[in-house]
């Protein structure tokens, strides 16, 4: 396997923004990678923030900004995970498209998922339903099982 950490130059002078522990300041209209314009914050978790971005050609992509700098524990864990998953390709798994280190911060570019179960649930509730219909949930469960079987058998 390729060691991703050694594939990217790291600027030791990167300054980390203390409020979010991000070297960069993602915001609507910012272009963290040339050609990729941030349009909307999708969410945040323990490892970073995820933003919707317009890519060259007008395609929507997801960009994850990993908290801290490339030398932080979170970034090292992400790099280890990326090193293992970068060769995995399956129709039910989002594809990893690009890995960058910008001003000392790890940035991960992937295809953008169309939606999530929470959004589908909320949509059905707004329409007066008690939740996602059983058949639709079973389809999602079947797709997830196929992807897990693939990961188990192939990787």
Image (spheres, rainbow, N blue to C red):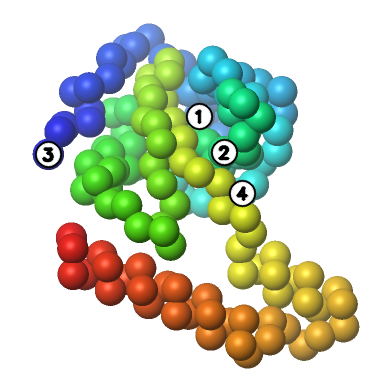
In the image, is 8 to the left or to the right of 38?
A: left
Position of residue 113 relative to residue 86, above or below, is below
Q: Which residue is mark 2?
A: 61
Label 4 and label 1: CA atoms lie apart by: 15 Å
Q: What label does residue 72 carry, if any?
A: none
10 Å neighbourhood of mark 1: few (<14), some, or many (≥20)?
A: many
Provide residue 125's location: percent of width, then percent of height.
80, 78
Q: Secondary structure at mark 4?
A: strand
Please report contact status of discs 2 and 4: CB closer than 8 Å, yes or no.
no
Neighbour tally class for label 4: few under 14, some 14-19, many 20 plus, Cα within 10 Å: few
| Location of mark 4 (residue) | 43
Nearest the eye: 91 or 134: 91
* Residue at the spot 63% in from the left edge and 90% down from the top edge: 134
* Disc number for residue 22: 1
- Tag 4 or tag 3, which sits nearer the N-term? 3
Using residue 115 as the reference point, say whether residue 85 is left or right of it: left
Q: Which of the numbered marks, if any, corresponds to residue 1?
A: 3
Of 10 and 97, nearer the camera is 97
> In the image, is 94 to the left or to the right of 139?
left
- Quadrant of the drawing holding the N terminus: top left
Is residue 69 shown to the viewer in this render? no
Q: Earlier in the sequence, mark 3 or mark 1?
A: 3
For marks 2 and 4, the one nearer the N-term is 4
Residue 104 visible, this angle: yes
């Amino acid at each position: 396997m390729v060691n991703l950490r050694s594939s990217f130059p790291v600027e030791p002078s990167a300054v980390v923004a203390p409020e979010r522990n991000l070297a960069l300041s993602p915001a609507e209209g910012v272009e963290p990678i040339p050609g990729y314009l941030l349009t909307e914050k999708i969410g945040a978790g323990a490892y970073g923030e995820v933003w919707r971005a317009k890519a060259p050609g007008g395609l929507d992509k997801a960009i994850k900004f990993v908290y801290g700098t490339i030398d932080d524990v979170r970034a090292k864990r992400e790099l280890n995970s990326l090193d293992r998953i970068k060769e995995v390709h399956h129709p039910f798994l989002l594809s990893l498209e690009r890995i960058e280190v910008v001003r000392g911060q790890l940035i991960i570019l992937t295809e953008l998922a169309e939606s999530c179960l929470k959004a589908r649930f909320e949509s059905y509730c707004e329409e007066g339903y008690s939740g996602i219909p059983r058949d639709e949930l079973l389809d999602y469960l079947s797709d997830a099982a196929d992807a897990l079987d693939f990961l188990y058998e192939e990787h």
